[in-house]
Image (spheres, grey):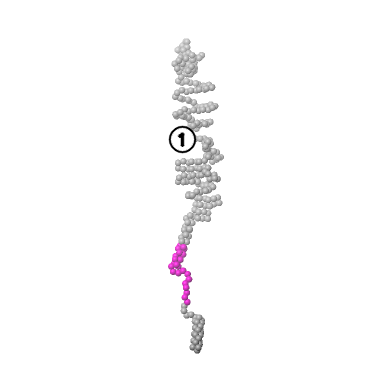
């Protein structure tokens, strides 16, 4: 028992010594350097981050320089851009403008001191549509022709708005005071012409001609041809017919001459060589309608010189 008691005393003593040593080590300051663990990005990750930051800075500088260059070239101002100006009355374009896409506007007009020019490499087309989007009118200016597609086409005078020319499906109306055709071959009409008056220009002759066919003038109340200050001539190659179905044919003039008509001879019972030359004739008609002249006498001499009718 003494031995076991000694062992227990020794163990208790060792336990105290270990406790004292442990408490002394905790109270004494440590002489070793503390270990610090780094926090952040280091190495190749840090270099990549700096590279991307530098690249972003360069990109921002280039974008800013390009923006300033575009503003300078396009001439951006508080009123608009380049030739485009925004005013209270709308948008104003100065110089030549080109539109690549459709342009929708209410009104286009030029300045007071310059014309309005619409130019295209192919043609210029102006369309008019209704509220449903259907095409109601079209004007096309091309290299070969100018075409207008509409129900009625009108040309009006600048003063008064008088209709100078109008055309629709039924008729064409020319409202000018004078229609002048300057072509060398005149005006060609494929069908009839209806007019109340045909007049030539002053000091010019009026000529109605049909080169290969006949010329017909018809009127229900008569046709009048009048030469107030000159001669009226009717010339034909064959017969000249003057016919009146219900009236008479009258020749009213101071002198009526048949220059190339046949003349009969009147032989008196007592001829005299000293008789004056015959200058007055009588107009005679044969049964077949032939006219001839007979020397005038105290009475009719047509029977005395009717032998001309036998040879006709």
Q: What secondary structure is the magenta-colored segment mainly? A: helix
Q: Which residue is depicted at the point 46% across and 69% down?
A: 41
Residue at the extreme top of the image, as rendered: 270
At mark 1, the secondary structure is loop
The residue shown at (53%, 45%) is: 133
Residue at the (47%, 59%) spot, across then down: 63
Does the stretch in magenta take in 105? no
Q: Position of residue 229 (x, y in %)?
A: 51, 27
Q: Please state the horizontal and vertical placement of residue 80, each as a whole percent of the image.
A: 52, 54
Is 240 placed above or below 166 here?
A: above
Q: Nearer the viewer, residue 171 or 268?
A: 171
Question: Is residue 192 depicted above or below 120 in this figure?
Answer: above
Mark 1, Cα crowd under 10 Å, few <14 / some 14-19 / many 20+, is: few
Image spot of residue 108 (x, y percent):
52, 47
Magenta stretch holds residue 44: yes
Name the residue that disc number 1 marks: 183
Q: What is the span of residues highlighted in magenta in the rendered image?
A: 34-58
């Amino acid at each position: 028992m003494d031995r076991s008691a000694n062992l227990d005393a020794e163990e208790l003593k060792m336990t105290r010594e270990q406790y004292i040593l442990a408490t002394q080590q905790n109270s004494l300051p440590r002489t070793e350097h503390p270990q610090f663990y780094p926090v952040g990005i280091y190495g190749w990750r840090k270099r990549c981050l700096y590279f991307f930051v530098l690249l972003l800075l360069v990109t921002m500088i280039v974008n800013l320089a390009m923006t300033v260059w575009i503003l300078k070239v396009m001439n951006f101002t508080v009123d608009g851009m380049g030739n485009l100006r925004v005013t209270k009355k709308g948008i104003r374009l100065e110089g030549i403008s080109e539109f690549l896409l459709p342009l929708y506007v209410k009104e286009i007009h030029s300045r007071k001191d310059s014309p309005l020019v619409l130019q295209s490499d192919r043609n210029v087309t102006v369309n008019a549509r209704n509220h449903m989007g259907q095409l109601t009118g079209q004007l096309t200016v091309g290299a070969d022709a100018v075409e207008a597609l509409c129900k009625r086409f009108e040309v009006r005078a600048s003063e008064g708005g008088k209709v100078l020319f109008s055309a629709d499906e039924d008729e064409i109306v020319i409202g000018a005071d004078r229609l002048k055709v300057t072509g060398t071959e005149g005006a060609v009409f494929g069908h009839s012409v209806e007019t109340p008056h045909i007049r030539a220009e002053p000091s010019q002759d009026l000529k109605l001609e049909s080169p290969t066919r006949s010329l017909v003038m018809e009127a229900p109340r008569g046709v009048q041809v009048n030469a107030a200050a000159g001669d009226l001539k009717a010339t034909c190659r064959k017969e000249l017919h003057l016919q009146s179905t219900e009236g008479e044919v009258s020749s009213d003039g101071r002198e009526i001459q048949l220059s190339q008509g046949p003349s009969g001879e009147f032989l008196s019972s007592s001829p005299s060589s000293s008789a004056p030359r015959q200058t007055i004739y009588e107009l005679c008609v044969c049964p077949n309608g032939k006219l001839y002249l007979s020397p005038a006498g105290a009475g009719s001499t047509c029977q005395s010189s009717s032998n001309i009718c036998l040879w006709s």
